[in-house]
Structure formats: structure tokens, C-alpha cells
Image (spheres, rainbow, N blue to C red):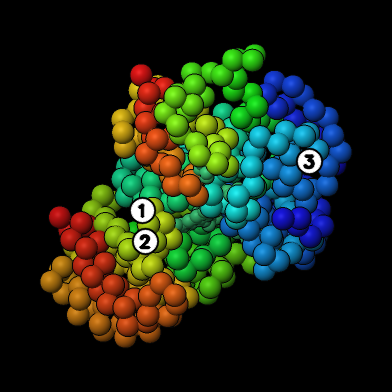
Amino acid sequence: MDVAVSVNGTVYERDVEPRKLLIHFLRDDLDLTGSHIGCDTGNCGACSVIFDGKLVKSCMLLAVQANGAQIETVEGLSEGDELNALQRAFREHHALQCGYCTPGMLMSATALLRDNPSPSDDEIKTALQGNICRCTGYWNIFEAVKAAAR
Amino acid sequence: MLLREVEYAKPASVAEALTLLAADDGARALAGGQTLINVMKARAASPDALVDLNGLEELKGIELGADGTLSIGPMTTYAELIASAEARARPILGEVCATIADVQVRNRGTIGGNLCSNDPTNHLPPLMSAIGAQMTITGAGGTRTVPASDFFLGVYMTAVGPGELLTRIHVPAGRHDGFAAVTLGVDGTCIVNAAATWDGKLRIALGCVDAVPVLVEADSVDDVRAAVRGARLDPPSDVHASSEYRAHLAGVLAERAARQAAG
Ligand SMILES: Cc1cc2nc3c(=O)[nH]c(=O)nc-3n(C[C@H](O)[C@H](O)[C@H](O)COP(=O)(O)OP(=O)(O)OC[C@H]3O[C@@H](n4cnc5c(N)ncnc54)[C@H](O)[C@@H]3O)c2cc1C
Ligand code: FES
Ligand code: FES
């Protein structure tokens, strides 16, 4: 099926099989390997992207469902060669160890701060509920989001 | 995971969706996909064709009637219901939806998908049973509206037949409701859950203890434990809880939900 998908502002036109998951389309067809596959069952959040303004897990959608949609991935966060404020906060607060969960964490935090620029502590924790960090560095991730929120 | 080969169609109307579903025995409706895509990955089901209901405005929206009743489109996501001013007419709906999984699942998962999948651990089948919701089903043969007791038929089975769609969910007016669950982690999968409503007497629906929600009635909160014992539950055992423990939790949670409803 022919699809046209906007990812980080660039429109990609591709022929995809309906059975292809959005995460595989991003990683394999578009070579945007920033979004990770952790569980492939909708549990870990490593594949989180923003889909028409809403945070979703891209292993739980088909690529053909993204026809005409605007997708934002971790590759779109930096401002040119500069890390954005949230990414800098992650670096400054040591909010990543192996980094596997980081793209998903960043997208979840991005979606939160866009809707709610000054979240409460509980709102930050709720916003990150769908993202698992197997290095269990949750506290520093929380601190980084809190710092970026100010 | 690479899924088995599947066809995909995105109809522009409910009528077209029904035609597509009726034309192919192996076709399945795709709502939020937050159950179905995993089911397909696991090859527990391998539909030949997916009929994507996303984008069908007819299946969206929440209307509040002058009498306080709500009419909910099955393609309403949990997040949309939580944000809906109309849905606040029955506050328990938003309260329970806010405890389903996480932001990402709530942004995609739909009220209709939750009911149609009828997983015994889902949050909404017991809730809709307790509050007396009615479901409208549409197919080539026309439209019928059934109460929850006739809608949930078995594990993963509902009154929605082949070639049919759940097209509306009707919720009566009321505010005296409660919900309680013991879950795997905060907002995780339910080990047992209970929904209750109070309208002069208590109606309680228990989830995770049988193939379909189990209804129990009681005159007062003090009678709830005895009423649950009277239901002679024989819940399944699994790695999370033995049958005996689930039966015990059912009594505890029924009482908690009932106290919230009556309070
Ligand atoms: C990590 C994770 C955790 C979860 N935890 C919970 C939880 O704790 N509690 C809970 O309740 N749920 C939970 N869920 C499931 C989630 O709520 C699903 O969204 C829901 O069960 C199904 O809704 P859906 O819109 O995604 O439906 P889909 O997955 O698209 O569809 C499910 C089934 O219903 C059918 N269907 C859907 N809509 C219609 C319709 N209008 N007419 C006819 N048939 C229809 C489909 O054909 C399919 O068979 C979880 C999901 C994930 C990924
Ligand atoms: S890979 Fe998608 S949620 Fe884990
Ligand atoms: S930093 Fe390793 S998984 Fe989170």
C-alpha cells in the first residue's frame, strides 16, 4: 500500500505491507533507528513516538495507519546540532545509563511538557508510567524532567 | 514481530465498514489495536483483513442527554473520555479509565475495544455491568440494543456477531458508583476488580473471577460479604493468585467498591 507519512517534518512516500508495524517502518524503511524495540508487546515504551500530537507506542500500530499522519521521533528533538533543553537536562542529571529507554522517555516527557509545562511531581510520574527503564534509573529521569519543566 | 500477511482497509462510513466485514469471514475490526495487535503478534488470532474503524466520526463522541444519560461512541479513547466534560455526568467512567495502563495505551485504546475484547481482567466489562449500561450492535440484519448481561458471553466473546459492530454504548444517569481493584503494580492488570452502584440497593459486578462479570446484589454494605459468598465463586488460579485468594479478594473489593458507591 502507498503511504505518505510526515516524520519530523519530512514527508516520506513509501510502499508498505499492511502487516508492517510502525516501529519497523521507522527503523527499517526510513532508517530512523532512534526509536527502540524493547518488548514488542506494548509494555516497555521504548518505541514511544508522538502521532498526530498524541504519545503512542509504535509497536502497537501498523505503518499503514500512519498514512497522512505527522509523526515525531527522538531524532526530531535536537535544535540543529544542539541538544534541546530536555535532552540537556537528561545529560546534566545522568538520566541515562545504558540509554535504551531514553528515546521513549524523552518522547513521553516531550508530550507531557507540551500539554503541561509546569507539571506536579505526581503528574511527571504518571506521564512516565508507560516507560520502563531496565537500568532502573527512574529517580534521575524524574529529576531531569522536573528540571526541564521549570 | 512480523505479523502474518493481512489486508487492510480504512472505510469512510459505518455502512462501508459493515459491508467489508460481512464480505469476508476472516475480517476483523481494528479499533485502538492495543489488544488486537498483540493478539496478532502472538498468532492467537490471524485475521485475513483488518477493517480500521479509526476516523469514523459516527463511532466517536459523547452526548449527554437532558435526563442525564450518556451516549458514548465506541471509538472514544480512554483519554478522550477522561477529558470529556459530558462524561463527568457519571464520574466513575473517567476515574476508572484514568487507571488503565498508561498514557500511551489511554491515547489509543477505546471504550468499545475494551468491551468487545471482553478480556476477564479488563476494567470496563464489570464497570458497564454494574452501572447498567446497554450496548447497541449494528449489522446487515439491523440494530439491536442489549444489556450488559446479554452482551458479555464468554472469555473474549460478546454478543457482537460476525459482520457486526458495536456502534453505541448507553449509560444511565447516576453518580453513586465505586470501583476497587488489586492490580499488578500501580494501574497494572487486575488480579480481581469490583464495580458497584447504589440506587436504593447495591449492584456489584466482579471481574477476573469468571468468564464474564459476576453480578451480586445487596441491600447494604454490611450484607456485601455474605452476598459474594452466596455467589459461590470458583475463580481460576494462576501465577498471580490462587483460586482461594481471588475468591477472598472478591469479597474485600466488593465491599470497598460498595462503600464508595454508598458513601
Ligand atoms: C501494556 C498494556 C496494558 C493494558 N492494561 C489493561 C488493563 O489494565 N485493563 C484493561 O481494561 N485493558 C488493558 N489493556 C488493553 C487495552 O485497554 C485495550 O485498549 C483494550 O482491551 C482494547 O481496546 P482497543 O480499542 O485497543 O481494541 P482493539 O485491540 O483494536 O480490538 C479488540 C477487539 O475488539 C474488537 N472490536 C473493537 N472495537 C469494536 C467495535 N466497535 N465493534 C466490534 N468489534 C470491535 C476487535 O475486532 C478486536 O477483536 C492493556 C493494553 C496494553 C498494551
Ligand atoms: S517495544 Fe513497544 S512498548 Fe515495548
Ligand atoms: S537507561 Fe538503561 S534502560 Fe533506561
Q: Which residue is disc 3 drawn over? A: A28
Closer-to-camera residue (A86/A59): A86
The amino acid pointed to by label 2 is Thr
Residue B229: image x %, image y %? 25, 82
Q: Secondary structure at mark 3?
A: helix
The residue drawn where x is 53% and y is 52% is A43
Closer-to-camera residue (B54/B101): B101
Residue B133 is marked as: none
The amino acid pointed to by label 1 is Val
Q: Is residue A136 above or below residue A146?
A: below
**Viewed as shown, does residue B156 lie left or right of B235?**
right
Q: Secondary structure at mark 1?
A: loop
The residue drawn where x is 15% and y is 55% is B263
Q: CA distance from mark 2 to mark 3?
A: 36 Å
Q: How many other residues sit within 10 Å of disc 2, few (<14), some (14-19) or many (≥20)?
A: some
Where is the C terminus of chain A found, in terms of image quarters? top left
Q: Is residue A122 above or below residue B203?
A: above
The residue drawn where x is 45% and y is 66% is B121
